[in-house]
Amino acid sequence: MSNDPKNGSTDNPASSNFLRGIIEDDLASGRHANRTDKNGQPLPQVVTRFPPEPNGYLHIGHAKSICLNFGLARDFDGRCTMRFDDTNPTKEEQEYVDTILDSVKWLGFGWKDASGDHLYFASDYFDQMYAMAEYLITAGHAYIDSQSADDMAKNRGNFGEPGKNSPFRDRPVEESLDLFRRMKAGEFKDGEHILRAKIDMASPNMNMRDPAIYRIRHAHHHRTGDKWCVYPMYDFAHPIEDAIENVTHSLCTLEFQDHRPFYNWVLDHLAEGGFFKKPLPHQYEFARLNLTYAITSKRKLLQLVEEKIVDGWDDPRMPTIVGIRRRGYTPEAIQLFTDRIGVAKADSWIDMSTLEGALRDDLDAKAPRATAVLRPLKLIIDNFPEGETVECSAPVHPHHPERGNRSFPISRELWIEQEDFMEVPSKGYFRLFPGNKVRLRYGYVVECVGADKGADGNVIAVHCTYFPDSKSGTEGSANYKVKGNIHWVSAAHALEAEVRLYDRLFTDAHPDAGGKDFKQALNPNSKEVITAYLEPGLSSAQPDEKFQFERHGYFVADRIDSKAGKPVFNRAVTLKDSWGK
Ligand code: ATP
Ligand code: MG
């Protein structure tokens, strides 16, 4: 499979993106050619935007949208603006603005180019939006409704039943304009009046039944402070934001399909009023990402954090970008994942194993190898001289000899995995059991001679003898044919470290589907903290550095809790997909 985003969908049937076809057609027809911005500067023919509301942390679904919007702009020599859709004053905070920018940058995208810095805040357009709303009133396309919220809801009708006109619908333009100005001046309480577009209360599309466009909200805004007490509704603000930023292809998730007629209504009427030139932005809908064994609703993720079910937004089990980053995901793995899932027009579920597979594929090629004993058992080599050590060496990466070798000592006492010894072997078991020989990977061949047991009958140490002429990489090693090959670390030299074994947060593939209580589906084993013995060289692991612990999986030095010389490791993903097997 090609990972080159420039190749797009053409040579890769597994990853299709219908939006590329639309953009290619638009480029061929010159639909957005020869446009200039308000300063007369030429505009690219493809302008997209990533428009998060700064009301939470971004998650893997947003990553799809980021890779899509910024990726299309990059591939078609266009521009993607980074826009905060901060038109709702009550839920938004600077903390979220900062983490969102950080996440987009981490994924490898930026908003500055030769033409400038394309970081925008919808709240910077409030003056323009207000002026446009006044224009719509003047032109007879909008009116102030003074019905109670209850009456307004009742008169909206429903799917089978047309709505009823508000008794205020035909109030004189001057009266609406006066009321709107007084709303802005702060003369009324929240909900007393509302500005509505005058469209069609009988429209089969509920979104066209005189939708609200401006409401009173006495609230402090994180950027505009107390300047405003009227705020535009999302469906009115969004097309305006797109048009101001010269967006050509406005990509949103499928649930906005029914909002598209109003999107077009707003832009057509404002173009008529001379606010915008044609061609106007066009909205296209794509399938949102639904990931199994995860939830991607900001509200529910907030609940996990607030109820301390997880250890914060960046808990490595969270599907947030800060969480998966801490888990050990790379931007390249996420890009690979989004390329593989493609962009479709119908909603579907993507299996978590697709995300995990992308990480494995990315790290397999890159991550240096290391040895880690996670469930330690002592192995004593009875005939190895006490106090002596011999250096052993192993490749940093088996497929990249140019990356050289790592070395670590072997000595009389080692740590091995508990599962690599059986007092009474089961059928087909060819690791350590009394009388059997195995190779200590990158070291010697040993023969098991017995085990020590504690008072409770548990094995506390295994004994063996070694063959001094069997060392890996020496001529004598060829004389030993053994089936088992186990890993180990020297007990006196091992790095003792905290290792966090993470697993999926939920046991149900669709933890919140159909209104289910996702807290009933929590995986009680999603986090296990152990003390492990690691290859000594890992003491110099840097925060965020990833390794393959041979036979175990991919691990990352935790970016928050690792200290110099004392890394803490997170399991990013196991070597094989063993879930549900
Ligand atoms: P909320 O749940 O608060 O409405 P949201 O998930 O819609 O939030 P926004 O901040 O409005 O979040 O989203 C920013 C952009 O990310 C939007 O363009 C939205 O379509 C896109 N997006 C959000 N969730 C997903 C998802 N699961 N898959 C693909 N794109 C998504
Ligand atoms: Mg939203």
Image (spheres, rainbow, N blue to C red):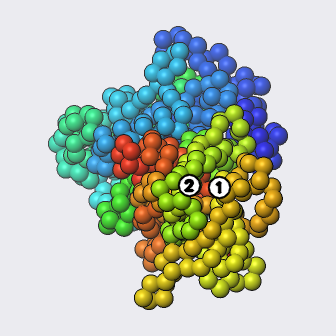
| Residue furthest to the top | 40
Identify the residue under disc 1.
443
Query: Separation of disc 2 and disc 1 at Cα?
Result: 7 Å
Residue 410 circle label: 2
Q: Is residue 417 visible?
A: no
Q: Position of residue 81 (x, y in %)?
A: 50, 30
Which image quarter holds the C terminus? Answer: bottom right
Q: Is residue 57 left or right of residue 308?
A: right
Q: Residue at x 82, y 40 (%)?
A: 11
In the image, residue 409 sits, relative to residue 27, either above or below, namely below
Instruction: Say which label, 2 or 1, has the lower sequence index.
Output: 2
Q: Residue at x 25, y 47 (%)?
A: 217
Kind of residue indicated by mark 2: Ile
Which part of the image, by quadrant, shows the N terminus?
top right
> In the rendered structure, which amino acid carries the disc numbered 1?
Gly
Front in this rendered view, residue 329 or 483: 483
User: Against 386, is 75 above or below?
Assistant: above
